[in-house]
Amino acid sequence: MLKHLVAAALAVPTVYVAFVLVHALATTSPIDSVARMLGSPWALSGLVDYSAGLLFSVPYLWLRASTLPAKIGLALGAIVLGNAFSVAVFIWLILSSDSTLRAAVLPVRTAFPPIDSTSASRRTFIGLALLAFLGYLGLLVYCVQAQPLATGWATIQGDAWAYATFVNVWTGQCLVLTYILVREGRDAKLFAAALSVGLVIVGNLATCYYLLHLFVLRFPGWHVRDVLLWNDNDANVDEDAPLLPKTSYV
């Protein structure tokens, strides 16, 4: 029942962002919109916010697939089609699981032995997350100084693609919020609440912080697969085997 309620809640922004994107495609040139967005700090922040969110959605979907073609397809879909695609796949993963909501979101039961913390995959991912965090933080500081928020919001509302980007980001944050509440809400309610508030206020800056928290502080030396997908719920030991084969990690 809980899975269906969560899926239904996620379906609302997913359908809306799909509608907004179709409207933008039908009415406005993307090239002209990008030029206008680059002239508005707050509209530009939406593009950066969207890009920062890909650091969560792309690896998560990549790791949920068991074959290389499927991994590539999901990653490209998330990048090109945005969160209308990513959240739709996330909903399907939830509904297609015969287990609990937690097991559907975090399907890995047994983590691999720790690896060298200087491995290329970990260094690359941490480096990208840190770069996105610092870059987006700097941009937000600049936005506050350079343009009133009301002016920026008027620009976003007045341009179809700028508004579509805003809704796209908001939809992706619903995915991240669901993940955080499922993973952290049981044992770290205050932390989950703080991250949720952070998502609302500073967008995917909070996502980047959470990724750095997981990779640097909480699971140092762990495989990327296990950092994002490990289910530490002892109550689930009698459930079905993990949804992922052991080969699907980076």
Image (cartoon, rainbow, N blue to C red):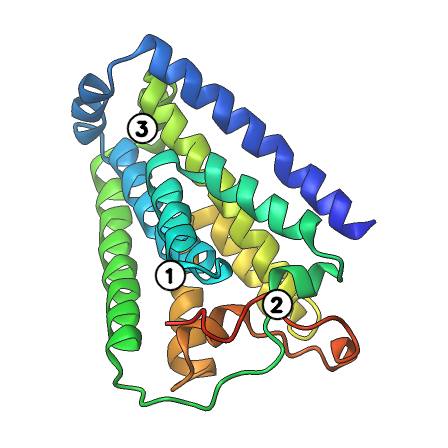
Q: Earlier in the sequence, mark 2 or mark 3?
A: 2
What's the distance in space between the residues labelled 2 and 3, CA to CA?
Answer: 41 Å
- Mark 3 nearby-residue class (10 Å; few <14, some 14–19, many ≥20): some
| Quarter assignment of residue 78 | top left
The image position of residue 115, as x and y in percent, is 37, 89
Amino acid bearing label 1: Cys
Q: Nearer the viewer, mark 1 or mark 3?
A: 1
- For disc 2, the marked residue is 107
The image position of residue 24, as x and y in percent, is 37, 17
Q: Secondary structure at mark 2?
A: loop
Asked if residue 94 shows in the view, the reply is yes
Q: Report the number of numbered marks.
A: 3
Q: Earlier in the sequence, mark 2 or mark 1?
A: 2
- For disc 1, the marked residue is 208
The image position of residue 233, as x and y in percent, is 70, 77
| Residue occupying image coordinates x 41% and y 79% | 223
Asked if residue 150 shows in the view, the reply is no
Q: Earlier in the sequence, mark 1 or mark 3?
A: 3
| Quarter assignment of residue 156 | top left
Q: Secondary structure at mark 1?
A: helix
- For disc 3, the marked residue is 152
- Mark 2 nearby-residue class (10 Å; few <14, some 14–19, many ≥20): many
Q: Nearer the viewer, mark 2 or mark 1?
A: 2
The image position of residue 105, as x and y in percent, is 62, 60
- For the residues labelled 2 and 3, say whether their Cβ atoms are less than 8 Å apart: no
| Residue occupying image coordinates x 75% and y 80% | 237
What's the distance in space between the residues labelled 2 and 1, CA to CA?
Answer: 22 Å
Amino acid bearing label 2: Pro
Query: Is 6 situated left or right of 36 in this image?
Result: right
Residue furthest to the top in view is: 27
| Residue occupying image coordinates x 39% and y 41% | 77
